[in-house]
C-alpha cells in the first residue's frame, strides 16, 4: 500500500492523495516498522557459506 501511494504521488507530482490518507499511511508504516524489528534475523542464518550457489554469486 505504501509503495502504491508513493508511486501515485510521484506520477501525479503532488501529495494530495497521500494527504487524504495520511492517518492510515502512518499507521501502516508504524506497523511495518514494529514488525520488522521483532522479526529480524541475521543474514548468517539465511546464507550458508558452504552453499555452492552462494559461493558462485559472491565470488
Image (tube, helix red, strand yellow):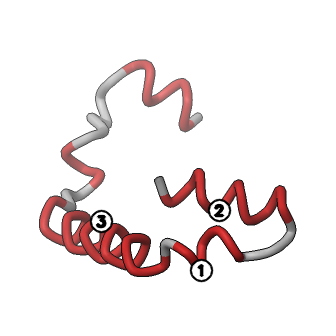
x then y, percent, for residue 20: 55, 75
> Where, quadrant-wise, is the C terminus in this rendering?
top right
Query: Which element type, helix, strand or loop, lies under badge 3?
Result: helix
x then y, percent, for residue 51: 33, 24
The residue indicated by pointer 2 is 6
Crowding near the residue tagged with mark 2, few <14, some 14–19, many ≥20 C-alpha atoms within 10 Å: some
x then y, percent, for residue 12: 84, 61
Looking at the rendered structure, which numbered label has been put on residue 32? 3
Judged by depth in the image, the label closer to the viewer, 2 or 1, is: 1
Please tell me which of labels 2 and 3 falls first in the chain.
2
In this rendering, position of residue 46 left or right of residue 12: left
Looking at the rendered structure, which numbered label has been put on residue 19? 1
Judged by depth in the image, the label closer to the viewer, 1 or 3, is: 1
Crowding near the residue tagged with mark 1, few <14, some 14–19, many ≥20 C-alpha atoms within 10 Å: few
Q: Do tag 1 and tag 3 residues touch (Cβ < 8 Å)?
A: no
Judged by depth in the image, the label closer to the viewer, 2 or 3, is: 2
Q: Do tag 2 and tag 3 residues touch (Cβ < 8 Å)?
A: no
Q: Is residue 58 above or below residue 1?
A: above
Residue drawn 60% across the image and 72% down it: 18
Looking at the rendered structure, which numbered label has been put on residue 54? none
Q: Nearer the viewer, residue 18 or 33?
A: 18
Q: How far is mark 2 from mark 1, CA to CA? A: 11 Å
Q: Nearer the viewer, residue 22 or 30?
A: 22
In this rendering, position of residue 55 left or right of residue 51: right
Crowding near the residue tagged with mark 3, few <14, some 14–19, many ≥20 C-alpha atoms within 10 Å: few
x then y, percent, for residue 55: 46, 29
Amino acid at each position: 500500500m505504501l509503495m502504491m501511494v508513493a508511486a501515485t504521488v510521484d506520477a501525479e507530482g503532488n501529495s494530495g492523495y497521500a494527504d487524504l490518507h495520511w492517518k492510515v499511511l502512518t499507521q501502516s508504516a508504524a506497523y511495518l516498522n514494529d514488525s520488522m524489528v521483532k522479526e529480524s534475523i541475521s543474514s548468517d542464518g539465511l546464507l550458508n557459506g558452504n552453499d555452492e550457489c552462494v559461493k558462485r554469486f559472491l565470488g
